[in-house]
Amino acid sequence: MPFLGKDWRSPGWSWTKTEHGWKRIVLFGHELEDNNREIDLAELCSDNKENLFVGDVCELATTKRKKDLYNNNTKSQFVYRDKWIYVQKGSTKERHGYCTLGEALNRLDFSSAIQDLRRFNYVAKLFQLIARSQLTSLSGAAQKNYFNILEKIVRKVLEDHYNPRLVKELLQDLSSTLHSLTLHVGRCVLVGNVNIWLCRLETILKWQQQLNNLQIPKQMCNGMSFNDLPLHMQNKILYKLSDAYDIINLGQATPTLYLLSENQTLWKRLYHFHFSDKQFCRNVVLTKSDNVDWKLMYFTLQKHYPMKEQYGDTLHFCKHCSILFWKDRHLALLFKDCGHPCTANDPDSCLMPISPQHFIDLFKF
């Protein structure tokens, strides 16, 4: 027998208290709550290209446009802060269905993860990979949650000036993907009204302009600065960097750091960190004195081979329980908590760090 009533699994209505009692909140905004309010058709049709007709058609088009703009500006309806999720790739007797990329994006707590500097680069890289190839596979709620978290990422960069280059690359890839989907591929691959996606494109352009105009103020420090450290300590810090552009940008600060950043031994260690000896034999670049130019070698192989990724903290996957989770290092040290309800005898032996690309591959069926 079909269930004709409201779905009992839904979260229910939202209410607000007024002077005359409790009043239900309508999803499409306060502008449309009053059905008795008269609408000036001439005012509505003046600067709206959608309103090609008058009368009821004009009123319906304006009402629909208000709902679209409200849905675009409204945060996701369901907000999860789960530390772990069960990754299911098929139906069993105990569980039916499977876990999708959009469900993982909605349920895992990425909003709190971007506030942690160890996880910020990981989340930004994951969002960049989703923008390149997986945006159309997300549900409508997941896409809205994606842009909500992206807004927090941009706001954090503007406030803390942390790694703007990575976020600029993320926005550039996302803008190129949306431009291709809305103009070349067609509207059928996008979930929702095309006006919402055009509005999101304008928002991305505004974010790009804000990041391009970002100026990091010079910090006035009365104590010891980086230049006051001995040269061997400055050189040791450079050896800890795994990104070539960070080394180049740091070398532009002072003439001393420039000399340290051009050291061939530094670039040799950076090369061997990202690439193998087999790749070295195929692409040898020599100088005029028949010496290996390790800096040029690094940027030559960067165009042909993937580089090793390094993150302060990542998502972990338990091979025994098939659970994807954030590992809290403080709880792990204090209470020996592995981060999820694991039933294995040795939980640490079943854990596996998940790279951003591996995260996406987990949900390819």
Image (cartoon, rainbow, N blue to C red):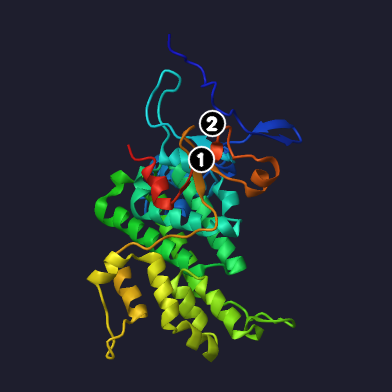
Position of residue 309 measured from the top left corner of the image (x, y, whole percent): 43, 60
Q: Which residue is drawn at 33% across and 82% down?
A: 293
Dot 2 corresponds to which residue?
A: 344
Position of residue 163 relative to residue 134, above or below, is below
Figure check: 338 above or below 46: above
Q: Residue at coordinates 35% horizontally, 74% vertically from top-left?
A: 298
Q: Real-space Cα distance between discs 1 and 2?
A: 9 Å
Q: Label 1, on which residue?
A: 349
Q: Position of residue 101 (x, y in %)?
A: 42, 41
**Mark 2 secondary-structure assignment:** loop
Q: Earlier in the sequence, mark 1 or mark 2?
A: 2
Q: Are marks 1 and 2 in contact (CB under 8 Å)?
A: yes
Which secondary structure, mark 1? helix
Q: In which quarter of the image is the N terminus?
A: top left
Q: Residues within 10 Å of mark 2 (few under 14, many from 20)?
A: few
Q: Which residue lies furthest to the right in this view?
A: 19
Residue 257, percent across and down? 53, 85
Q: Which residue is pictured at 25% across the width and 52% down the height?
A: 185
At a point 47% along the width and 82% down the height, the residue shown is 261
Residue type indicated by callout 1: Ser
How would you rate the neighbour count of disc 1 (Cα within 10 Å): few for under 14, some for 14-19, many for 20 or more? few
The one nearer the camera, 103 or 251, is: 251
Q: Looking at numbered disc 2 in the image, what kind of residue is underneath it?
A: Ala
Find residue 210 and report its horizontal and vertical position in percent. 51, 70
